Amino acid sequence: MHAGTAYVAGTRTAADWLRDLLIPLQLTSKLPRYETARRALRDEGVTRMVGHSMGGSVVLELGSRHRGLRTVTYGAPIISFSSSPDRHRDFFDPVSVFDFGADSRHLAFPHSYKGG
């Protein structure tokens, strides 16, 4: 959390890897990470959420339910054809390969925080 922005991390643990299977089933709202982010949105006065990987799916789901929330994603495992200047992915990233509307001009190491 910083100045009205919440940052939502991606997959971190072995349990998260298993929970990733819920995302393509459109059950992102069942993830523990979703509930934590939802509480931050409600309790902390958040107006913007930034998410990486699983966190990207979480913030997009919250954004669809809270119209005033601005969302920014990096490497989100979603399927989307609609363009957005606030969705980003590395060109060779296999996790976000189906986010056709994301900015994919980045040619850095796929799916890491060390991108260029």
Image (cartoon, rainbow, N blue to C red):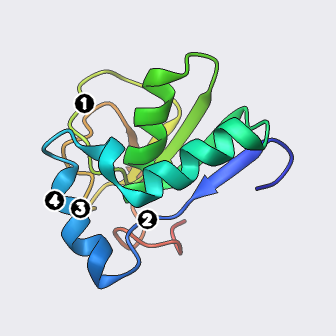
Measure how far apart labels 1 and 2 are at the Cα level: 19 Å
Q: Nearer the viewer, mark 1 or mark 3?
A: 3
Can residue 39 be seen in the rendering of this structure?
A: yes
Q: Which residue is mark 4?
A: 21
Q: Nearer the viewer, mark 4 or mark 1?
A: 4
Compared to 9, does 46 lie above or below?
above
Measure how far apart labels 4 and 1 are at the Cα level: 18 Å
Q: What x and y, as percent, mark residue 32?
A: 41, 59
Q: Amino acid at mark 3?
A: Asp
Whether residue 50 sits left or right of residue 88 in the image: it is right
Q: What x and y, as percent, mark residue 88?
A: 45, 45
- In the rendered structure, which disc, 4 or 2, sits on the residue that comes first in sequence? 2
Q: Nearer the viewer, mark 1 or mark 2?
A: 2
Q: Which residue is mark 3?
A: 20
Q: Amino acid at mark 4?
A: Leu
Q: Amino acid at mark 1?
A: Ser
Q: Which mark is residue 10?
A: 2
Compared to 39, does 45 lie above or below?
above
Point 62% across, 46% down: residue: 39
Q: Residue furthest right?
A: 3
Dot 2: few (<14), some (14–19), or many (≥20) neighbours within 10 Å?
A: many
Dot 4: few (<14), some (14–19), or many (≥20) neighbours within 10 Å?
A: few
Q: Which residue is mark 1?
A: 80
